[in-house]
Amino acid sequence: MVHLTFYAALLSGIATTIAAPTRRSMVVHESRELPLYFAHAGAPNPDTTLNLRIALTANDRNGLEQKLWDVSTPGSALYGQHLSFDETKAFAAPHPDTVQAVTSWLNENNITSVSTSGAFDEWLKFSVPVSTANSLFNANYQLYTEIGGPTQLTRTLAYSIPADLQQHINLIHPSTDFVRQIKGAKLGGPVPNSNSNTARALAAPASCNSVVTPACLQAMYGIPTTKATQTKNTIGVTGFVDEWPQTADMAAFLTKLNTAVPSDTLWTEKNVDFGVDPQHPGDAGLEANLDTQYTIGLANGVPVTYYSVGLGFTDGIEGFLDVMNFFNALPTPDNVLTTSYGLDEASISTSLANQLCDAYMAAGARGVSVLFASGDGGVAGAQSQNCTTFQPAFPSGCPFLTSVGATQNTTETAASFTSGGFSNYWTRPSYQTAAVNEYLSTLGETYPGLYNNTGRGFPDVSAQGINVEIINAGESITAIGTSCSSPIFASVIGLINDRLIAAKKPPLGFLNPFLYANPSAFTDITTGENPGCGTNGFSAGVGWDPISGLGTPLFDKLLAAAGV
Ligand SMILES: *[C@@H]1O[C@H](CO)[C@@H](O)[C@H](O)[C@H]1NC(C)=O
Ligand SMILES: *[C@@H]1O[C@H](CO)[C@@H](O)[C@H](O)[C@H]1NC(C)=O
Ligand SMILES: *[C@@H]1O[C@H](CO)[C@@H](O)[C@H](O)[C@H]1NC(C)=O
Ligand SMILES: *[C@@H]1O[C@H](CO)[C@@H](O)[C@H](O)[C@H]1NC(C)=O
């Protein structure tokens, strides 16, 4: 708090500072090869306006990371003492000297219309013609089109920044990222008529081998059917690419598949980037319906917030960044945030990847469990594709979130499409060192050079992801993907948080140190592999593996481990 007042006072002085023009020596900040799936499509008109953002370095990024470990590691003196918005901002906001140094440089170049944005005022935004951007950053912005896809980008393969500003600038955006349109769950088959077992069983009914319902998950994972009691404990669901949940589908889902939840239960909607929710039946969104039906319909009584991220995104990454800027600015963020979209790690620049990963870190420091579907491309990445080395998925490689893989059948086996492997961007975090090293020692000399043996391994955990029944546009259908698994796991955590908060304890927050410290709170999945890139992929085995993680949740054991 004290820091903030101090910063505000200094900030107001900036406008009056007149920087003397300096000759700057420039250093290359980022460069890359053109990815195979994009083709050069000519030069842009030099007068075309580019909307640029500069990510400023945080006042104390490493201090915030240390806080995250302190509040998230069981046994630490600060465990559970999550940070307030103001405490987080004191670390994550740029230092006033940083704002001043970068603003002065822009002003020297006659760029005076600069605004700040981001949850912690960490972004400077301005618009310039392509020609100005090229000279300012020693860049070469060109047009690129996705081969066989819809994406068109104005990007540069390299750019430079002044050497004396390196300590103040994380990245210029957009620049070297080549992100394709993100994708969600896949459609499975129609639901056979014979299925409709809504009673809780000790063992899951045989029908759960062909169609997975909330009752199946309650049986398999011991998820309570009783209503949660805490109205302020919420689960957030993010939705992208103009996919919206339908209220009529939700009512039909609850009526058919979980009558313990009142059929008129809805979500609270928050809109980002002009997201909407028109409720026209033709606009039903598979992923949005899946994600809301398996939170509202599984975490009985836990309120759900739906973040509808529209096509008005300007962040070059489908709204992934915009939604975190919005979310991290909330005075009371949801205790759990689940996202069932992702992309290939190689498609996003390392600096933008780090910027987003640090946004998840900031959410974790505040006590949010950030969950992501691990991806549906096996070892080939977020989606199936041709490859000569394994492609890690983003953001699963970020160490500050929980990546969820998929399983199938009542005697669970890992689902073959589950993206899993090792990040090329982030090293292995200490919470998983022992678990991952054990896996790598059994892997031995298999796949040399195809994966990164120092990288953060993912997924962390898993849950059912094949033939999950939903209601979409009035029809009973099944969905397939790790897209199913993330909201299911989110519901488990949401219900544990309900018990914790009822017992006057903090929510679980960033999960991984807790999860890896309690491997016996999971059913270890020991069969299945995730083929791709012309290989059989990784195999599930005893202990953690890069296809099922630690395994699938056992509610009562997780609850006991959480101390309630
Ligand atoms: C900024 O504007 C001034 C006055 O119009 C001009 O003399 C100067 O060359 C401009 N500087 C740059 C870097 O464009
Ligand atoms: C899953 O269960 C179904 C029905 O019992 C069976 O036909 C199928 O082979 C099983 N799949 C796997 C991967 O075990
Ligand atoms: C891989 O490449 C082959 C031959 O170029 C093509 O037919 C196939 O569709 C590609 N597969 C994927 C998943 O891109
Ligand atoms: C492997 O991962 C490390 C981080 O653990 C990274 O520094 C290195 O560049 C990666 N190697 C490749 C080939 O991407």
Image (cartoon, rainbow, N blue to C red):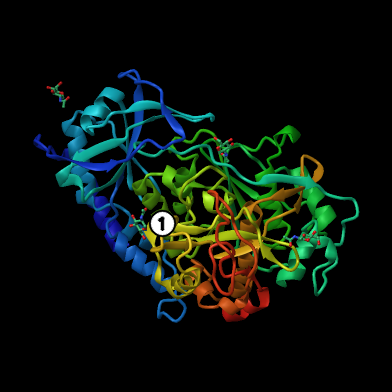
Q: Residues within 10 Å of mark 1 (few under 14, many from 20)?
A: few
Q: Position of residue 484 (x, y in %)?
A: 66, 54
What is the number of callouts on the image? Answer: 1
Residue at 60% x, 55% y: name it: 418
Query: Hey, what amino acid is under mark 1?
Result: Gly
Q: Position of residue 291 (x, y in %)?
A: 66, 51
In the image, residue 129 above or below residue 66: above
The residue nearer to you, when weighing 429 against 555, is 429
Which residue appears farthest toward the front when viewing the image? 445
Quarter of the figure that contains the C terminus: bottom right
Q: Is residue 225 visible?
A: no
What SS does tag 1 mark? Answer: loop
In the image, residue 132 above or below residue 274: above
Q: Give the quarter of the image for residue 454.
A: bottom left
Q: Is residue 257 visible?
A: yes
Q: Is residue 475 left or right of residue 532?
A: right
In the image, residue 181 above or below residue 60: above
Residue placed under numbered mark 1 in the picture: 449
The residue nearer to you, when weighing 294 against 375, is 375
Q: Position of residue 422 (x, y in %)?
A: 45, 59
Quarter of the figure that contains the N terminus: bottom left
Q: Give the quarter of the image for residue 235.
A: bottom right
Picture quarter with ligand 4: bottom left
Q: Position of residue 397 (x, y in %)?
A: 45, 57
Residue at 30% x, 63% y: name it: 62
The residue nearer to you, when weighing 228 against 490, is 490
Q: Is residue 502 left or right of residue 252?
A: left
